[in-house]
Amino acid sequence: MRDDDMTDTLLAFFENQRMMETADYLGRGRAFGRWPTGRLRGRWVRVCRAAFAADGDPGDRELSDLCAEFGLRGLELPLHHVEAEVAAATERAAAARAIRKAEGRRLVPDDDPLMVFLRELDAPRGAAN
């Protein structure tokens, strides 16, 4: 697969994930739908910081729901408020990746949703999963 094709594939995967999370959020009643934008931003920053501080999974449902609400409103995430946390998490991830690589372990688990998606993409058409 060419680099441009891989980039397009990854973007499609992440867009699909975003749409599924938004549909899930809407299906559960859009809990943040009536919140003022300032309150929404403040909650997103607090939840995001807490996830990074706890080495939490950024796929946390509340964080996903908050991101979905931003998307539904056409608002940008206030990423500038969590730059330090993102940088620290990136450093931790790079260190963990270096350790896994040095130990000869896979960098991404086989059951990671992205890995499953890529395997399915590469599978011959009509093949059973």
Image (cartoon, grey):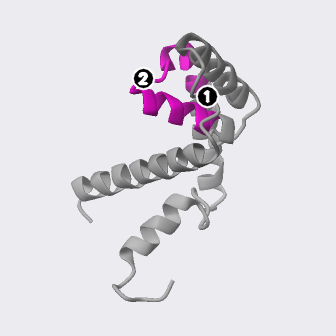
Residue 84 visible in image: no
Q: Is residue 82 magenta?
A: yes
Point out residue 52 in the picture as x, y percentages from the top left corner: 68, 29
For mark 1, what is the residue? 32
Instruction: Please identify the residue farthest to the top as the structure is shown.
Output: 38
In the displayed structure, 54 sits above or below 5; it is: above
- Front in this rendered view, residue 99 or 70: 70
Using a 10 Å C-alpha cutoff, classify the residue at mark 2 as few (fewer than 14 neighbours), some (14 to 19) or many (20 or more). few
Q: Tag 1, which secondary structure?
A: loop
Q: Which residue is mark 2?
A: 76
Q: Is residue 122 above or below residue 13?
A: below
Q: Is residue 49 magenta?
A: no
Name the amino acid type tagged 2: Glu
Left or right of residue 90: residue 1: left
Q: Residue at point 42% right, 89% down?
A: 127
Closer to viewer: mark 1 or mark 2: 1
Q: Residue at x 65, y 44 (%)?
A: 96
Q: Which residues are magenta?
A: 63-87
The amino acid pointed to by label 1 is Phe
Foreground: 49 or 34? Answer: 34
Image coordinates of residue 34 in percent, x first then y, are: 59, 23
Q: Percent position (x, y) of residue 45?
A: 62, 19
Say above or below: 30 vs 10.
above
Q: Residue at x 50, y 52 (%)?
A: 20
Question: Mark 1 or mark 2: which comes first in sequence?
Answer: 1
